[in-house]
Image (spheres, rainbow, N blue to C red):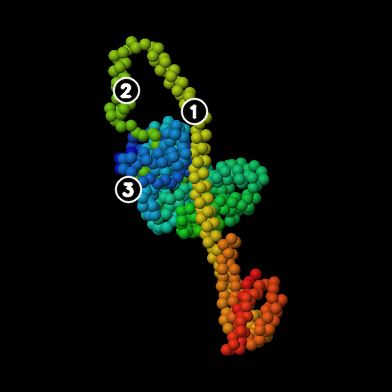
Amino acid sequence: MSKKEQHSFSSVLSINPYKNSYVFGSAATLSATVSPAYSKEQYVISYLSTKSFINSNIAVSKNIPEDDLHDAIYSKVYDELGLDQALSYQVEYIETFNKLDEENRNFHVFIIEPLAVDDLFKGVVEKVKYIDEIIPAPLLFKPLYTKDIIDDDGVHCFIYFQENDTFITLYNERDFIYTKSINYSFRQMHQRFCELYGEMVEYEDFIHFLSYEDLKTTDSPYKIFIIKLYKEIFANINDVLTYVKRALELEKIDSIYIDTQLSSITKIDEIAEVELSIKSSSFTFDYGFVSRDEKYVDHLHSLMYLYTSMFEEERYACNFTIYHRPPQFTNRESGRFIIFSVAAILLAFLYPVTYWTLSYAQSLQYKIMEEEYKNIHISKLTREATINNKETEKKKVLQLVENEKKEYIDKKNTLIKIHEVKVNYPMKADLLQILTKDFNAYEVNLESAFYAETQKSEKNEASKEFRFGLVSSNDKRMTDLIKHLTKTYGGKFHFSINEISYNNDEKLYFGELKVSLL
């Protein structure tokens, strides 16, 4: 059912299938109800928690026609995530935009095994018959931007604690980019709290403390362990945000919106701001409607009600429902089937009873096998798909590590070159100063000086050598100088002179002294 068709409904029923809670919305007011019932005038909406589905990013060529896009995405999901080809997973997707990828269209896909939907909503459908829309929980934040309830841009992080799941969702420039479920639902927090506290505490007492005790003022013995638990949770959240910023190349996260399914006195947003050093606030959004009985309403119910009016955002239509409203009776396949069946029964009322018996037996056998299939395979297949998704994430992380290693090696080589320059140039100057003093001591003049480095290919090292042009009026002074230098600096340098020549015109001796650095 399209968003535009929703205008014909006078009320909305939002469902939390994990807590079996229902909220009725009409005329800008919300009220909880414990006895929902089917109504033609009622639009029914629910959601899937983040841990209920697999989500990933894929890219397909821009050359694929729009009519073939669904099949192309479906095929790519099976190939890249390694899904079991024998199963027909339910795949929904929204398009994302990557300015750096000009050749492909990018999509964020949400994947779930159909039997999981049926398992979750079986009891709900018995009460309300049809569910018009079942959407992934992370997309519920989109109407906050569409309705300008959040009117600033940037990178926003939403964190929501529930009894069955706690998830992190990021929006960048008003568009969804990332979501992840973390292992700190209220049930999991309770287990971890009992480990820290050292003894078993009733779940109801734990929830009562979170709801009605203020960590700033309470003197409960639970206080210090709750603080430790929150620090552990926010350390985990910080690791997730660090990974996301690096993986998605985000400079920073501008704001965090954090809240819980409970009506809590403790300001968890203040704790988040201290622990994460990011501006944080609770879900105190101006939704534009109020609770009829002034009781606390789970924020996801408010967001679902808001989502039903987001008509202009067809790109975010991501509906997992398998409980569609049927068309008029005569236009339904089942209606035609019933009409033809009745006619066939009237025409063939003497059809053998054995046929119906066999049909019933086959139907019964099918149901038994279907139930057995659900019990045995649903857990196995979901875990396999999750493992494959984690392997994909692992490859991305390893690639990031490899890039960091390359950057480290480049910086290291640069520092080595800088060090060589700082060490070698002062060394040359010191050597010239030392040798010049010796030249003067033996009254040998310096006519020229050269320095050269020759690469040794076998060791990839450089041979460093000085050449000095010496002039003296006495050849013995030269030989005495060389003996002195060899004796004094023999462990550091190698000295050699091939010949000493005499110039009759100038009455002087000339020689080239080679000094090799060892």
Q: Amino acid at mark 3?
A: Glu
Describe the element under mark 2 as helix, strand or loop: helix
Which residue has dot 3 on it? 312
Q: Residue at coordinates 43% horizontally, 46% vertically from top-left? A: 57
Q: Is residue 170 left or right of residue 495?
A: left
- Could you tell me residue 28's position as x and y percent? 37, 47
Residue name at image x 38 percent, y 12 percent: 353
- Label 1 environment density (alpha carbons within 10 Å; few <14, some 14–19, many ≥20): few
Query: Closer to the observer: label 1 or label 2?
Result: 1
The Cα atoms of the two marked residues, 1 and 2, are separated by: 29 Å
Q: How many marks?
A: 3
Q: Which residue is mark 1?
A: 373
Q: Amino acid at mark 2?
A: Ile
Amino acid type of the residue tagged 1 in the rendering? Tyr
Q: Which residue is mark 2?
A: 338
- Determine the CA span between mark 2 and mark 3: 38 Å
Disc 3 and disc 1: Cα gap in Å? 41 Å
Look at the picture and state if 454 lies above or below 360.
Answer: below
Labels 2 and 3 touching (C-beta < 8 A): no
Decide: few, some or many residues near mark 2? Use Cα within 10 Å; few <14, some 14-19, many ≥20. some
Determine whether the residue tagged by mark 3 lies in a helix, strand or loop: loop
Please identify the quadrant where the C terminus is shown.
Answer: bottom right
* Outermost residue to the right: 487
Q: Earlier in the sequence, mark 1 or mark 2?
A: 2
Q: Nearer the viewer, mark 3 or mark 1?
A: 1
Closer to us: 335 or 464 = 464
Picture layout, residue 449 above or below residue 101 = below
Q: Residue at x 43, y 19 (%)?
A: 362
Looking at the image, which is closer to me, 223 or 412?
412
